[in-house]
Image (cartoon, rainbow, N blue to C red):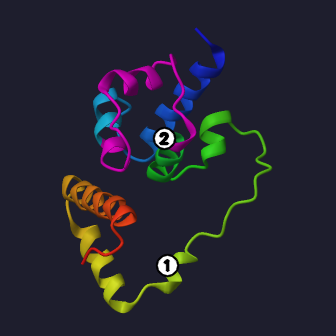
């Protein structure tokens, strides 16, 4: 077994437990897919991450680190120092109106499946909007 992949799987399982989740493929699959806007991962992919057979791509790694509230570099590589400069978070949030903030507050009260439904709808509308700028 690849040592790098095994070490990643250990860090992932530890981060899941630290965040209050069981380190099981079904938990990882469900929680990850409720937050990821791309093609959902399968149970088998989540299992491969947890048993040290594969490491997710960077976009998926970022979703995992955001969900588990850990640094993506630490999750991927361990406690090696990160040389990357972090982008200031929240800068786009400064432009939200009160109505936008109320909508986000309401969104956060939804169940995870309903939040995913809203994200999917927004993604679909924004994709169509890019090709049909005249939609109302």
Residue 46 appears at what percent x and percent y?
38, 28
Quadrant of the rendering where the N terminus is positioned: top right
Left or right placement of residue 93 versus residue 83 in this view: left
Left or right placement of residue 99 versus residue 63 in this view: left
Q: Of the numbered discs in the image, which one, if any, rests on residue 60? A: 2
Magenta highlight on residue 47:
yes
Whether residue 65 is situated above or below residue 29 in the rendered picture: below
| Badge 2 element | helix
Query: Magenta part of the protein: which range?
Result: 31-60
Nearest the viewer among 74 and 120 is 120
Magenta highlight on residue 81:
no
Nearest the viewer among 16 and 46 is 46
Residue 121 appears at what percent x and percent y?
24, 60
Identity of the residue furthest to the top in this view: 1
Q: Of the numbered discs in the image, which one, if any, rests on residue 55? A: none
Kindly identify the residue that appears in the image at 59 percent across and 39 percent down. 75
Kindly identify the residue that appears in the image at 28 percent across and 79 percent down. 103
Quadrant of the rendering where the C terminus is positioned: bottom left
Whether residue 34 is situated above or below residue 14 in the rendered picture: below
According to the picture, the residue beneath numbered tag 1 turns out to be 93
Q: Quadrant of residue 47?
A: top left
Kindly identify the residue that appears in the image at 27 percent across and 55 percent down. 120
């Amino acid at each position: 077994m690849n040592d790098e992949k095994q070490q990643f799987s250990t860090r992932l399982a530890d981060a899941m437990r630290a965040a209050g989740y069981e380190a099981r493929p079904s938990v990882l699959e469900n929680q990850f897919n409720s937050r990821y806007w791309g093609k959902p991962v399968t149970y088998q992919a989540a299992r491969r991450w947890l048993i040290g057979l594969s490491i997710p791509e960077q976009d998926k790694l970022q979703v995992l680190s955001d969900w588990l509230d850990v640094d993506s570099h630490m999750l991927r590589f361990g406690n090696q120092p990160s040389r990357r400069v972090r982008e200031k978070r929240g800068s786009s949030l400064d432009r939200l109106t009160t109505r936008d903030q109320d909508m986000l507050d309401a969104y956060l009260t939804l169940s995870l499946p309903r939040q995913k439904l809203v994200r999917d709808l927004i993604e679909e509308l924004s994709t169509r909007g890019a090709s049909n700028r005249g939609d109302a």
